[in-house]
Image (cartoon, rainbow, N blue to C red):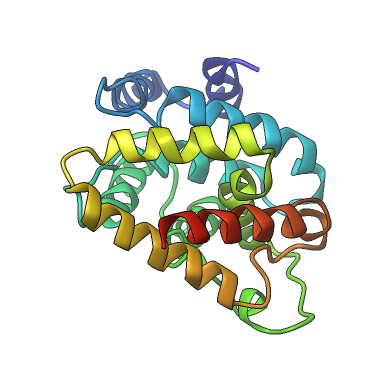
Amino acid sequence: MELENVWNKLTSDLPSTKEEWWTKILTSLNDPKRKCHNYSYLAQKISLYETIKHLLKNREAVEYALFFSYIEYGPMTVDGNEKNIAHFKQFATECGIPLESDLVRDTLVLLECNSSCMTEEHIKEGAFGSEDKHYFLDLDMAVLGMDDVTYNQYWQSEKEENDVVPESMYNTFRTKILKTFLQIPNIYATKEFREKYEENARRNLQRDVSCLD
């Protein structure tokens, strides 16, 4: 499904200001420096989202969080998540969505948890999560459990996106992240994602760590 179609359906009841925000989102995603977290990456996440949206409590909030997650992103952007939260608040204000509404509240919860990538259900053995935030985070981690080609392509493009970082420093940082995921009981919080991706994700990560070490 084309991202613009998803955006237009999501914002169908909003004033024309929404078009300016779509242009802003599109410009960020199509920035030539975005080798990984770009239009194609979001389109893949939206496609996967379509398969689990029936399990969500507030689909609109999850969709907005997906669109606003990567307006600001890059190796030199240390406060990207905070800026994306500010962007969404500004968008809501300009489009007449009350900041005290459930939609804004739920979207902000998702955007705020995006910085940690982890919940209690990720670190507690045998625990499962079923809240929107759990599915939202699992959507982001799904690529870690995909086939070898998709997994390797993701990290290659991620490395290219961070080309301003010295390779040795990047590899050290990447190894640290991968080992963190291997050390926690659950890479995926939800039952659906864990059953589908957990085993392969651990296999991918372990292989990657062995090569980097």
Residue in the picture at 32% in, 47% down: 84
Q: Is residue 135 visible?
A: no
Residue 15 position (above or below residue 134): above
Q: x, y percentage for residue 41? A: 50, 30
Relative placement, left or right, of 74 versus 11 is: left
Q: Nearer the viewer, residue 183 or 67?
A: 183
Q: Nearer the viewer, residue 114 or 55?
A: 114
Residue in the picture at 81% in, 51% down: 196
Residue 166 position (above or below residue 15): below
Relative placement, left or right, of 72 versus 176 is: left
Q: x, y percentage for residue 189? A: 69, 66
Please identify the quadrant where the C terminus is shown. Answer: bottom left
Relative placement, left or right, of 203 versus 40 is: right
Q: Is residue 49 visible?
A: yes
Q: Residue 128 occupies which quadrant of the picture?
A: bottom right
Residue in the picture at 68% in, 62% down: 188
